[in-house]
Image (cartoon, rainbow, N blue to C red):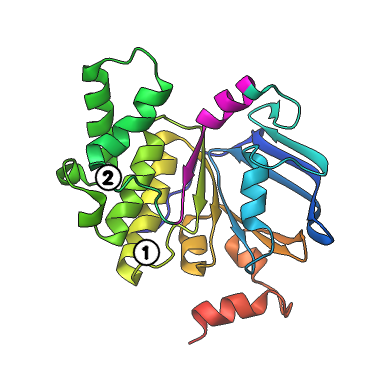
Amino acid sequence: MEKQKAKIDLTNEVVKIRGLEKSFGDYDVLRGIDLDLYQGENLVVLGRSGTGKSVLIKLISGLLMPDKGLVEVLGHNAATISQRELEALRIRIGFSFQNSALYDSMTVRKNLEFPLVRNRKGITRAEIDKNVESVLDAVGLSQTINQMPSELSGGQRKRIGIARTLILNPEIMMYDEPTAGLDPITCIEINDLINEVQQNYNTSSIIITHDLTCAKQTGDRVAMLLDGQFQRVGTFEEVFATDDKRVKPFYDYNFTE
């Protein structure tokens, strides 16, 4: 499915990063990066393994603290707000993990109910059922409601993981390698779902991936993380319009005929 043009508000930065640095011992992972994520935008972050992509989303969510620089999320600096404020902020950020992170001992219904019951005090049974049915319909898996995760395919597990994230109506979505380990047809379906979530839920998203087809199909912008900094940021075509030997192999591996 061809990506529809998203309604992106370039005056509204939902994530603002300036001069961000993070090291572990003598290893400098992020070396003074700047980046903005705008309201309604899908931003893809590309880079080799170990370049700091996952560290970046942990810093944005407040799971790690920066050594230096600013990380502002939905108007809040995660490094300076209280623990209660940080927990409230995290509810506004949805995570789609690489392994889907479903509870194997719970049915699909119970997996989806869990974050609602935990975070929405006083929610009624009718409201829970309505929300569960709504997000299952959104990911096209209403028929799986009483199945166990072990009965689902890899692609279905990914979709249920996304549904469980959507049930709290997050403003920002974080996708960590959303197409990893999936066959090509299922990858296309997941890419389409990411775009549908953007359109239907008006989310702003950061998509961590090595899959350039995913990057091309879902990204309004692409940011290439190399040597601890964003070396190229722009549309997919702009990022790969280069002979830079650090960048070109990504494209050649995926698309060379």
Up/down of 82 relative to 29, above or below: above
Q: Is residue 174 left or right of residue 134?
A: right
Give whichever of 27, 131 is nearer the camera.
27
Q: Amino acid at mark 1?
A: Cys
Q: CA distance from mark 2 to mark 1?
A: 26 Å
Q: Secondary structure at mark 1?
A: helix
Q: What residue sits 36% from the left and 26% below the top?
A: 116
Q: Which residue carries the number 2 mark?
A: 105
The reply to whether callout 2 and callout 1 are in contact (CB within 8 Å) is no
Report the residue at 60% width, 66% height from top: 237
Does residue 92 belong to the magenta stretch?
Answer: yes
The residue that disc 1 covers is: 187
Residue lying at 54% horizontally and 81% vertically, measured from the top left: 253
Q: Is residue 1 above or below residue 59?
A: below
Magenta residues, as a range? Answer: 84-98
Q: Is residue 137 visible?
A: no
- SS of the residue at dot 2? loop
User: Would residue 141 be found to the left or right of residue 61 on screen?
Assistant: left
Q: Position of residue 154 (x, y in %)?
A: 31, 60
Residue 46 image offset from top left, x and y in percent: 61, 62
Nearer to us in this view, 198 or 53: 53
